[in-house]
Image (cartoon, rainbow, N blue to C red):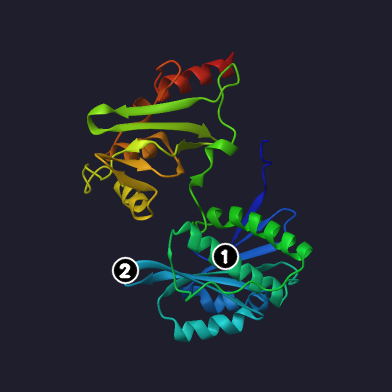
Amino acid sequence: MISQGRSLELFFVDGRPDGMLTAEVFNWTGHVLRTPRTQLKEALAREEAGFTGVYLLFGERDGDARLYIGEAEDMRLRLKDHAVKKDWWEFAVLITSAANNLHKAHVKYLESRLVEIATEVGNIQLDNGNIPPRSSLNEAAQANMESYIDTLMIVLPAIRIDAFLSKKRSVKSIEFATTDDGEATRFTFKMPRHDVEAYAVLRQGELIVEAGSRVRPAWVGDRKHNTHYYRLHDELLAKKIIRPDGSGGVMVEDYAFSSPSAAAAVVAGRSANGRTSWTVIDNGMTYAEWEERNLEEDQE
């Protein structure tokens, strides 16, 4: 089943991409306001700042990115308090509804779920001491809030909030780019001398490296020039998505990469051209050759 597209409206309040902005999705009751701390006074003067909602505080502490998730019946009052008592945060995101129809139980549920998701994804350190308990909502209200969260997970990455964005995937449950006979197109990348033998599939612009793939257990390339992928390799090791195994490493879970080269670099442990490193299992074509053939077929 192909997911339907959604229409996101961003409004840059003062015309600057790094200033205040609002985000709304057509036919969604939610409303999101992102503001740098330097514009907190202006943000709190807005009507939605006084609504019941959930807020996110982002910044750094001791050199590490940090996030605090909270809820309030009047976010304006709570953020004024945090401006005095928390000196580490640099920008805030206020999450509510355009009609201010979220109540205390809604936002306590939303706060708990966002802490759960951020903890599971593990992209950022949480300043919250623990996961707050979910509020008692009936079955229908919980379903409504989960639907609200599904759309929120589209909005937040669109405004450069990746704390809740997981790259883990389940290859068995997704649709792939397919060959003419309808079979999934799978790619492989092998470096026998280094115990590397990885497999991947393409889906919706992501190359998903499959669990069980053999990869380099450490970054061996240059960390100073030409690539930033060593940070991603280090991150996957830290999260135990790559696990050392004998003379090499193994991908413990299916993981999605934004480009063939990102996937190839993590697999090889050094900078690599993914368009030539990945080859189609069935016919040995490089990713670049496979892509070129597909584009030519579309023109016929």
Q: Residues within 10 Å of mark 1 (few under 14, many from 20)?
A: many
At horizontal 66% and vertical 79% (from top left) the residue drawn is 50
Residue 255: give x, y in percent of width and height: 45, 43
At horizontal 51% and vertical 62% (from top left) the residue drawn is 118
Q: Is residue 193 visible?
A: yes
Residue 284: give x, y in percent of width and height: 40, 17
Residue 129: give x, y in percent of width and height: 47, 76
Q: Is residue 265 above or below residue 108?
A: above
Give the spatial CA distance, label 1 vs label 2. Answer: 23 Å
- Asked where in the image residue 139 lies, by quadrant, the reply is bottom right
Q: Is residue 126 above or below residue 149?
A: below
Give the labeled residue for mark 1: 114
Q: How many marks?
A: 2
Q: Is residue 192 left or right of residue 293?
A: left
Q: Earlier in the sequence, mark 1 or mark 2?
A: 2
Give the labeled residue for mark 2: 63
Q: Residues within 10 Å of mark 2 (few under 14, many from 20)?
A: few
Could you tell me which secondary element the residue under label 1 belongs to?
helix
Q: Quadrant of the N terminus?
A: top right
Q: Quadrant of the C terminus?
A: top right
Q: Is residue 198 above or below residue 281?
A: below
Name the amino acid type tagged 2.
Answer: Gly
> Of all residues shown, which one is farthest toward the top?
300
